[in-house]
């Protein structure tokens, strides 16, 4: 497995390697997650659930329905798929926090 870390800059329509990484507020930053480390799913939930409770409900569903390790630390993100349906359709993504690079 190739795991050497390298840094690049996108300049003049091409990526160029950087010898030294420096911070510049004008730069865009990116990170990546290997596909095998990302778990995705969709769930339907009632539109009557308050927005402030949705994240907790999704966390509970993720651990219950996907059998996530209770001792593991995960980063969980979600977004609503816009529709006029009776229930909200939400896609959510989980990854072990230590796997995000």
Image: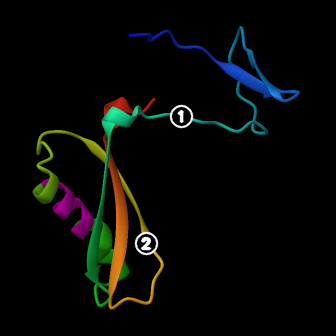
Q: Quadrant of the N terminus?
A: top left
Horizontal and vertical percent position of residue 74: 28, 44
The spot of residue 22 in percent (x, y) is 71, 21
Indicate yes or no whether the magenta region holds residue 86.
no
SS type, badge 2: strand
Q: Residue 31 carries which label?
A: 1
Q: Residue at x 70, y 39 (%)?
A: 28
Q: Assess whether mark 2 and mark 1 are in contact (beta carbons under 8 angstroms).
A: no
Residue drawn at x 75%, y 24% as measured from the top left: 9
Q: Look at 11% across and 58% down and name the residue there.
A: 64
- Using the image, determine if residue 98 lies above or below residue 42: above
Disc sitting over residue 78 in the figure: none
Part of the protein shown in magenta = 57-63
Above or below residue 38? Residue 80 is below
Q: Which numbered circle lies on residue 80? A: 2
Precedes in sequence: disc 1 or disc 2: 1
Residue 88: % across, % down? 35, 81
Label 1 Cα neighbours within 10 Å, binned few <14 / some 14-19 / many ≥20: few
């Amino acid at each position: 497995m190739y795991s050497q870390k390298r840094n690049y800059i996108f300049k003049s329509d091409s990526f160029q390697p950087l010898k030294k990484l420096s911070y510049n507020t004008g730069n865009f930053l990116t990170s990546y997650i290997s596909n095998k480390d990302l778990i995705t799913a969709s769930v339907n939930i009632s539109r009557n659930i308050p927005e402030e409770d949705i994240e907790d409900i999704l966390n509970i569903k993720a651990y219950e329905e996907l059998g996530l390790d209770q001792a593991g630390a995960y980063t969980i993100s979600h977004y609503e798929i816009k529709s006029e349906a009776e229930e909200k359709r939400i896609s959510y993504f989980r990854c072990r926090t230590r796997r995000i690079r």
